[in-house]
Amino acid sequence: MPVEFQMPTLRIQATKKLNELQSEQIRKEALLLLEEDRIQDMTTLEHKQRQTKAFVNRHRRKTETQFGIGKPVLVFQTKMGVMPSKLRYRWTRLVWIVNSKNGTYQLGTLAGEILPKWVNGFRLTRITR
């Protein structure tokens, strides 16, 4: 629908035989409705952004706070191939965190030996007791 039918211009005002006061009143009402719609859309957008932020914050991985030195963890086995077996257990080796630096962890076995390779925090999962 053309804008001039929603907010009467001079041409529509002349064809419908509206006086200036009526035409001005219709324009003001239309502007107020637009402003109300804008405010409602802004509040809806802010509400959705708060919901999205809360969801992301709840589900974000916090590897630095999850793993502490001396805590037991499981290591994710990544060298299993593309699809060796659907039912094969991918979390292996119960190990202990010995040292941490910038989201990577040095691990030690239960026997007390320290593993030479550092592991990224995304390959670890915490064991709850």
Image: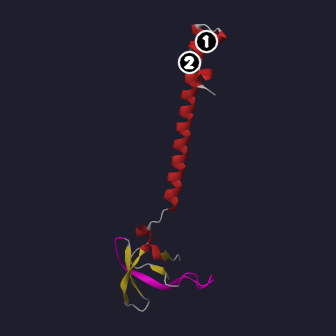
Read off the magenta span.
81-102
Q: Position of residue 113 (x, y in %)?
A: 38, 91
From the viewer's side, name the closer residue of 28 and 99: 28
* Residue 83 in the figure: left or right of residue 113: right
- Location of mark 2 (residue): 28
Q: In which quadrant will I find the N terminus? A: top right
Q: Which residue has dot 1 on it?
A: 13
Q: Amino acid at mark 2?
A: Lys
Label 1 sits on a secondary structure element that is helix
Residue reaching furthest to the left: 101
Pick the front one: 102 or 80 = 80
Identify the image quadrant of residue 37.
top right
Callouts 2 and 1 close, C-beta under 8 Å: no
Residue at figure coordinates x 48%, y 62% from the top left: 60
Nearest the eye: 62 or 52: 52
| Residue type at the position of mark 1 | Gln
Quick one: SS at disc 2?
A: helix
Where does residue 87 sit, x and y in percent of width and height?
63, 83
- Judge the density around disc 1: few (<14), some (14-19), many (≥20) Cα neighbours within 10 Å: some
Residue under the point 63% across and 21% down: 5
